[in-house]
Amino acid sequence: MDTAWGNILGQREPKRRLRRLLETDRLPHALLFSGPEGVGKRRTAEALAAALLCSSPAAGHPCDTCESCRAFSRGIHPDFFFVVPEAVGKGARSIRIEAMRALGSALARPPELAPRQVALIDDAQRMNEAAANSFLKTLEEPTGDVVFLLVTGMRAALLDTIVSRCLEIPFGPLALPELSEVLRRHGVEAEEAAALATLADGSAGRALALHAEGALRRREEAVSLLARLPQIPPLSLWAEGKKWGALSREEAGEWLRSLRLTLRDVLALYGGAAPLYSVGLEAPVAEIAARFSEARVFSMLADVKEAERRLLSSNVNIRLLVEALLLSLAGPVEE
Ligand SMILES: [Zn+2]
């Protein structure tokens, strides 16, 4: 486990606050890390946990060499408790009361190796009601020196009574250069990383998932489809419909999103702005802008949004949805 603060990208303000609290020994016994998914909340919580468990930390950094640090990096620290939601049967993943009771009784014992105990609760909003109430008791009656680190991407789904007992540390989305850097550290080439970063909504988790899913290729295909649209003969349009209609619901959602963001970039181009989304695809986007009127692009955008809305309904037929969309996008021939 990488516990170096320096390796956590971005998040300057949360890191600064936490290290200051650590250095001045004013860290409260419960913290809530909130913010979008995939921006480094859990990694930061792990770095903080390592520093809290280390027997000789320096300026908020774990030493990496003591027995405690070695146990932590091997994932076997006896004073570190990591709670994550679990799937039971067909139910949604949740944190159940059994897990919270087990945590409560573990924390009732004194620490074995470290000066204190640390409990990290990931996706804390997934505590079901019974678990949340049990946890609330543990929070209210702390036994010994325990630090609770709660992580959530959905703060609104947490009980107010829990939120109000924690110091909240908000995390923001990552900037484009930070997202590129994350991708580069995962072996993605610089140019591809920069392009993927623009699709990731500030989330490193999403950037990596997009990389794994081949999102760039799909984006290129979406741009090329729009550019070719006026020339596609009706018969080939059916072939396109068959191809895109075979996508899974998730893939179709990504494809529609690509079409929508490409059309937005075309509109930006009419307004004299540079494309935000189609980085590296400026030429085909300019071609689309030259080929269609602004009014037409607006109506194409409306068609795509409508298809996105329909995709959400439970019994949607993706093939039919795609075919209808392609027909309306192709529209009447423009002079
Ligand atoms: Zn140490």
Image: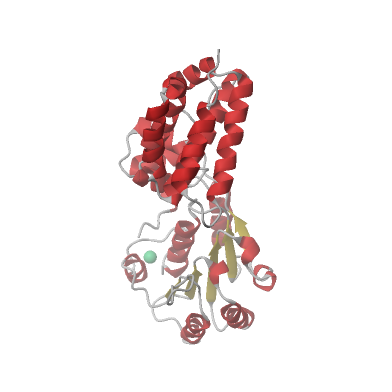
Q: Quadrant of ligand 1?
A: bottom left
Task: Please name whichever residue, 335 or 49, is drawn nearer the observer in this view of the structure.
Answer: 335
Q: Residue at x 50, y 73 (%)?
A: 94
- Foreground: 208 or 308? 308
Q: Quadrant of residue 73?
A: bottom left
The residue furthest front is 235
From what the image shows, is residue 179 above or below residue 93? above
Residue 291 appears at what percent x and percent y?
51, 16
Q: Confirm whether residue 101 shows in the render.
A: yes
Give x and y (percent) for residue 8.
Answer: 44, 50
Say which of 59 and 315 sits in front.
315
Q: Quadrant of the C terminus?
A: top right
Q: How is the image coloured?
A: secondary structure
Tell whether 95 sits left or right of 244: right
Question: Number of numbered discs present?
Answer: 0
- Residue drawn at x 41%, y 23% as measured from the top left: 233
Q: Quadrant of the N terminus?
A: bottom left
- Would residue 199 be seen by someone viewing this image from the given angle? no
**Is the residue 278 above or below the residue 314 in the image?**
above
